[in-house]
Amino acid sequence: QLQLQESGPGLVKPSDNLSLTCTVSGDSISSGSFYWDWIRQPPGKGLEWIGNIHYSGSTTYNPSLRSRVTMSVDASKNQFSLRLSSVTAADTSIYYCARHMGNRNWFDPWGQGILVTVSS
Amino acid sequence: DIQMTQSPSSLSASVGDRVTITCRASQSISTSLSWYQQRPGKAPRLLIYAASSLQSGVPSRFSGSGSGTDFTLTISGLQPEDFAAYSCQQTYGTPYTFGQGTKLEIK
């Protein structure tokens, strides 16, 4: 059974970079048909899609965050990562990783999520 | 971006009730819509994809309908574990966008 687990610091200072990793278990991240996504949810607000990466390294980012987002994949560790630069309090959110199949743009499964707070 | 408007934002109901949540897209998205359930501290769960297809393992009391711009999620015969938050998502194209969510509470 495929499982995803987010990890990283729960507290980041304003203007710093936020870095999170999603560890995939139960299947290979190199399965060709799948894309690996990051989604976030600010407290009390709706979900926001951040972007995704294919194991080949191809990425698609939300234009609203594109200038600050970098995603990468480490197939040897079965992990993919998110880096969000120059964070502000508005980036405080629960961050989720998830998977979707190339031509089926729904997310399944998801990780449990990690709360990242931006505060000095 | 395609805007997704979900209503109501919150809903109170009792065990055994039938409830309906609606989601409206700012442009036609055919049947490119999915629904998710969120419980506190748990991974979001895919319930419905392609507007009306039930994800494997999801109880049949959940159903989805709609096409174009208007969609509904119906839960028939609410169970205690169904009191959670529900969100719609358009799968039509990037950037993928979600509704603001509906919190289903016990009356």
Image (cartoon, coloured by chain):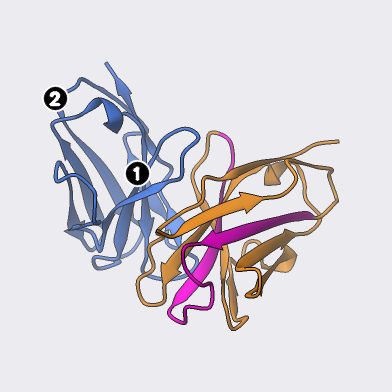
Determine the residue positioned at 52% across, 39% down: A45
Whether residue A86 is situated above or below residue A67 in the rendered picture: above
| Residue of label 2 | B16
Chain painted blue:
B
The stretch in magenta equals A18-43
- Please state which of residues B35 and A97 is positioned toward the viewer in this rendering: A97
Which chain does tag 1 point to?
B
Which numbered disc, 1 or 2, marks the residue closer to the eye?
A: 2
Total numbered labels: 2
The residue furthest top is B107
Q: Position of residue A76 (x, y in %)?
A: 65, 74
Q: Earlier in the sequence, mark 1 or mark 2?
A: 1
Which amino acid is tagged 1? Gln
Measured in 3D between alpha carbons, the distance from the residue under mark 1 to the one under mark 2, in whole angstroms, is 23 Å
Q: Residues within 10 Å of mark 1 (few under 14, many from 20)?
A: many
- Find disc 1 in the rendering and name its residue: B6
